[in-house]
Image (cartoon, rainbow, N blue to C red):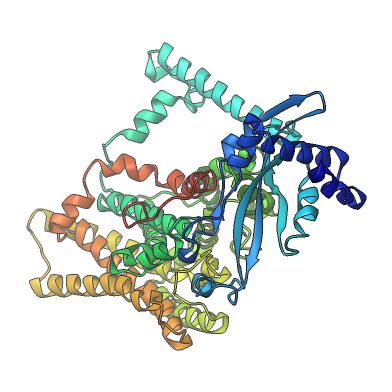
Amino acid sequence: MEELLALKPLETHGVSVKCLRDIGQTLLNILARTSWALNMLDATSKIPSGILVGNVMEFGNYDQCLDVKVNKPWGSFTGQHCLVLLPISPQSFNFSSALLQGSDLDYISLGLSLCIPSTCKPEDLQYGLSFINKNLTVSPLLCHTQDEPPLQTIEWIAIYVLISLVVLCVFSTSYDLLFTEKDKHNKLLTTFSVYTNGKNLFTTESSSGSLEALHGIRFLSIVWILEGHVMMFVTQTPSINFLQSLELGRTWLHTISESAPFAIDTFLLMSGLLISYVFMNSMKSGKKFNILLYYLHRLVRIMPVLGLLTLIQVSIVRRMGYGPLYEFAVTKKIIEPCVDYWWTTLLHVQNYVNPLKVCVPTSWYLAVDLQLYLISPIILFGLLKKTRITYVFICTASLIGIIIIFIQSSLTEISPNYVHINLQMPASFYYTHMRYVPWLIGIILGYILHETTAWRSEVKFGLSRLSKVIVTCGWLFAILCTVGSIISIHPFSQKDYVYNPIEASLYFALTRPLWSLGVAWIIFACVSGYGGILNAILSWPGFRPLSRLTFCIYLLNFQILGFMVFTLKVNPYINSINQ
């Protein structure tokens, strides 16, 4: 009974009687080697090995703890898994300063897991541990049992919406398949048909006049973004060899991953290109421009998926996974931003209004794209009516954009070093005024491709051609711009790099337009018949259905990667393959 007497003073400080009783009984049953008590002890963390190489988070055995069920005459409870955090300052261990290098954090947290009775609240555990170390913290979001809270109203709404969509798909697909006379189909009733939409989605056929190379560029760009996001999550994922995994990010092999933000510039370039190219072709064919339909068309394409994803993240996402970190990470990174700022996402202002707390993390690009889309008619009609003046305006605006990027980067001291713990992009990463130059280059490229349509047909039939000198210089320029932009980030990621505002600002100001100009030549050369084997690869028919999936892949990839990371129950070992 000595263990029980030692716990008695805690009762006077708000620790519940049941908690004290069950902890005392657990200690007694550990001494008696009772199976359930030994399971609780076994599921509790021990001091992990590899702390000096970054293994600072020990989860114990999550499922083993939650599976404990005790029903005795003196009381009943289930196992509760709690992750206890202890902040470590750089002065505590030499490794701590290495972990914090390049980040905006003042400390890291050493995490150890305890398996305690469910009758104990997190604040009970917090108070008890304060006698050991007052800096130990226990968050309610890091304590879990098998009990699930009842569904909230917003969760029921999300479930009803999802069920309604499934019903609509079943009904629409049944109508589509049962009524075989396709010419008499009501198009509205086949809107949600899995058969028709699937057939349109996965077809490898293309319409005449389409720019085939864009399909390959679009898909490869989304793969590149995925690789960049994987690297970002590695900097936030507890691992056995965290310090070593950061060192892998400094190698030449991973320079490509660090340069993944250039894929965003590629998408902005293609967005401007297609807006300009389609608009010019439409005006040439004699169609009238309806600005309301122009804007409505874009909103109809993006709002259903974005709205549904926002609803899911503000409601049932907390029930879509479980693990030691899941509830904490999902609440802090998804639910709270969605509850507070869902309206910024639906209004497409999230890249300026609280850009570091975005409901759908990747939706900032949609805001940038839509904001540029809203002003595009002014530029497009300018190119159509006053071509030379608009050319001058675009070049001037691009030069101003480069200067803005340089000044903004200097003032906010943004570093291109992406290899450090808890990698987070700065707010200026999401601003439209820091992103519009590639889009303007795309607008010009789209106009050029429209104006050279007849010439490209002549090239196709051998009636005209570019000189070898121009083609060679064009490809050398493209290689220098693209490869140079990628490898230029390598020095910034090294451990001995010391922040220099001029170097960093020049990197941000120059690499984005140079990269875009290089990709612009690649697109022009490929669609004009000067792409060679690269055009054959990018124009492969298999890329057509894959490129149609890029929008949903882009919106969902962050959540899927987060699900994979935040549901971890043991620390992974990171190497050059799984990174």
* 183 up-or-down from 336: above or below: above
Residue 279: x and y, percent?
40, 55
Which of 441/408 is in front?
Answer: 408
Residue 522: x and y, percent?
24, 63
Left or right? Give the position of 14 relative to 308: right
Residue at x-position 44% and y-position 81% = 504
Q: Does residue 121 show up? A: yes
Residue 159: x and y, percent?
64, 29
Residue 101: x and y, percent?
50, 75
Q: Does residue 279 show up? A: no
Find the residue positioned furthest to the right. 12
Where, by quadrant of the figure, is residue 319 drawn? Answer: top right
Count of numbered circles in the view: 0
* 43 up-or-down from 213: above or below: above
Q: Quadrant of the C terminus?
A: bottom left
Residue at x-position 43% and y-position 79% = 509
Which of 32/579 is in front?
Answer: 32
Left or right? Give the position of 475 relative to 318: left
Where, by quadrant of the figure, is residue 467 drawn? Answer: bottom left
Q: Quadrant of the N terminus?
A: top right
* 535 up-or-down from 204: above or below: below
Residue at x-position 7% and y-position 57% = 462
Which of 115/255 is in front?
Answer: 115
